[in-house]
Image (tube, rainbow, N blue to C red):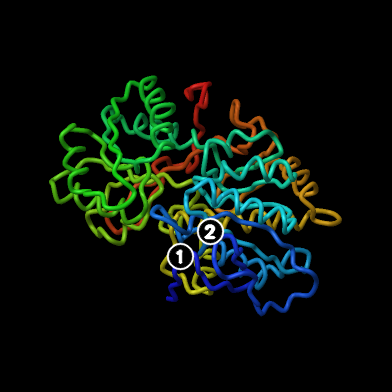
Amino acid sequence: MKKFPVGALTAVAALALSACGSSGGDQDTGTELPGTPIVIGAQAPIKGATAYPQTAYGLEAGVQYVNEVLGGIGGRPLEVDVCGGDGSPETAISCANGFVSKDVSLVIDAVDQSMGAAVPILSSAGIPIVGTLAGSFVADAAEYGQAFYFTGPVSFGALASMSLLDKMNKTKASLAVNESPTSHAYVDDLIMPIAERMGIDVSVQYPPASGANLNVIASTQLSDDPDMAGVIALPEDGCTSLFQALRRQGYEDTILAGSCSQFISDLGADAAGIVTQPRLWVPLAKDSAPAEVQEQLDTFAEAMEAVGYGDELSSRSIYTFAAIVNIAQVLSKTDGEITASAVTDAFKALKDFPTFAGPTVTCDGQQWPGVATTCNAQAIFFEVQGDGTLRSVDEGGYIDLDPSLVPTTS
């Protein structure tokens, strides 16, 4: 498998790196599709202490699939200009200004926490933001038409995790999330109020993004005697290290993994019983997925293998891959020139649209009270089996959430 330094990824199949995110610039992709490329932007968290390079891998595979398998968009090649986010608002602003100067028709939010800083700039230019889920509260709170997300808002994660605890009859949880102002706001404004309404006692640890002693975090969690330990959100390596520490220290009860997935292969048999809550069906759940989803997961795996990342089938990579495929399907049905205005209208018109490995969505601004950017209010949860595969906690897969439990001030 090929590995590239974060922020300096080699682009293939019409993936381009923006100068504001790397030293790369546009790359010669070798695509043979005729016509002028359809250029869209993407802000991906591929730099800094809390980088998720898997988001860039999924983008690269998505572009390869669209161009080389689907034949592009209306026969024209798709090009994605990726700006590498590092968690800072300054970089997000630089990325946004770059996208405006290049007159892209939309920008993918690759779950970048600093995306909120880009929203005012992109909104002023009339450029819509699209993604599987938002990276920040500010992006979630954009006005209708400024952003579209195929799954629930940031508050969705809090409601989903607490709903999972409630569904599994868990009443005391001890969970970790990296230290940051947004993490504290997420916990204080969402996790705690929702947990209180459900009668769940939650304690939270805030390890630093780098250099954290996760053995100490595990010990702190176990001192609370929880019936569910684990994470709200940590980078993949942090999840694995914490779960290993919990198992070493004798914890045998349920572990909440958030959207992490790397731990499954790293922990082996010790991963059994850990519960994960990605937004989409994931490859390890293929055997229990509906037939059409099984085919989509095969498509994802083949595309990732084609670009050299066959062993990076994480939730982060499928989020961005799915976003590319969904966008390509929407744009393929757009009449006339693909401008930012035309893209906005196309997404506003989406109704009962089956997303890639995800829920059916309607982007009418009415799917989540007070959050017009979200197109769905369902969640899916998986439990790791003894053989390392995943099985949906609910036999039906996606379940409806109750957004009324989310504080209205969030």
- Residue 292, image x, y percentages: 57, 56
Q: Residue at x 27, y 47 (%)?
A: 273
Of the two numbered discs 2 and 1 on the same chain, state the one appearing first in sequence. 1
> Horizontal and vertical percent for residue 274?
30, 47
Q: Answer left or right for 349 relative to 241.
A: right
Which numbered circle lies on residue 6? 1
The residue singled out by tag 2 in the image is 84
- Kind of residue indicated by mark 2: Gly
* Crowding near the residue tagged with mark 2, few <14, some 14–19, many ≥20 C-alpha atoms within 10 Å: many
Question: Quadrant of the rendered structure where residue 67 is?
Answer: bottom right
In this picture, residue 34 sits left or right of residue 392: right
Pointer 1 local density, CA inside 10 Å: few below 14, some 14–19, many at least 20: some
Which residue is rendered at x = 47% and y = 43% of the image?
397
Q: Nearer the viewer, residue 47 or 305?
A: 47
> What separation in Å lies between label 2 and label 1 (alpha carbons)?
9 Å
Residue 177's spot in the image, x, y percent? 34, 41
Nearest to the observer: residue 164 or residue 38: 38
Q: Are marks 2 and 1 in contact (CB under 8 Å)?
A: yes
Residue 299 tag number = none
Q: Which residue is painted at 55% across and 35% down in the image?
A: 377
